[in-house]
Image (spheres, rainbow, N blue to C red):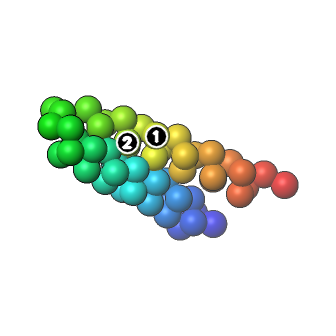
Amino acid sequence: MGWRALGYLLSGIIVWGGLGYLVDLWLELPKVGLLVGMLVGAGAGMYLLIKQMSP
């Protein structure tokens, strides 16, 4: 159960952070997209975790 929770959180941060990084490269922004992507990924991971753990 703990590994699943860790997987949700890390995968969300990595995937959305990666997409944010690509947006930064595309729009030539100073790591703003990376930060926003990581925050969105953490939020999405927490949402999935709560949804999975609730009865």
Name the residue located 68 percent from the left edge and 48 percent from the top edge.
50
Name the residue located 63 percent from the left edge and 66 percent from the top edge.
1
Disc 1 packing (10 Å; few <14; some 14–19; many ≥20): some
Rendered view: 12 above or below 26: below
Disc 2 packing (10 Å; few <14; some 14–19; many ≥20): many
Helix, strand, or loop for circle 1? helix
Residue with the mark numbered 2:
37
In depth, the one of 55 and 33 nearer the eye is 33
Name the residue located 71 percent from the left edge and 57 percent from the top edge.
52
Residue 33 picture quarter? top left
Name the residue located 72 percent from the left edge and 55 percent from the top edge.
53
Question: Percent from the top left, x then y, of residue 34?
Answer: 28, 41
What is the number of callouts on the image? 2
Rendered view: 19 above or below 4: above
Question: Percent from the top left, x then y, of residue 21?
Answer: 25, 47
Residue with the mark numbered 1:
40
Question: Percent from the top left, x then y, of residue 19?
Answer: 34, 51
Helix, strand, or loop for circle 2? helix
Badge 1 vs badge 2, beta-carbon distance below 8 Å: yes
Q: Quadrant of the C terminus?
A: bottom right
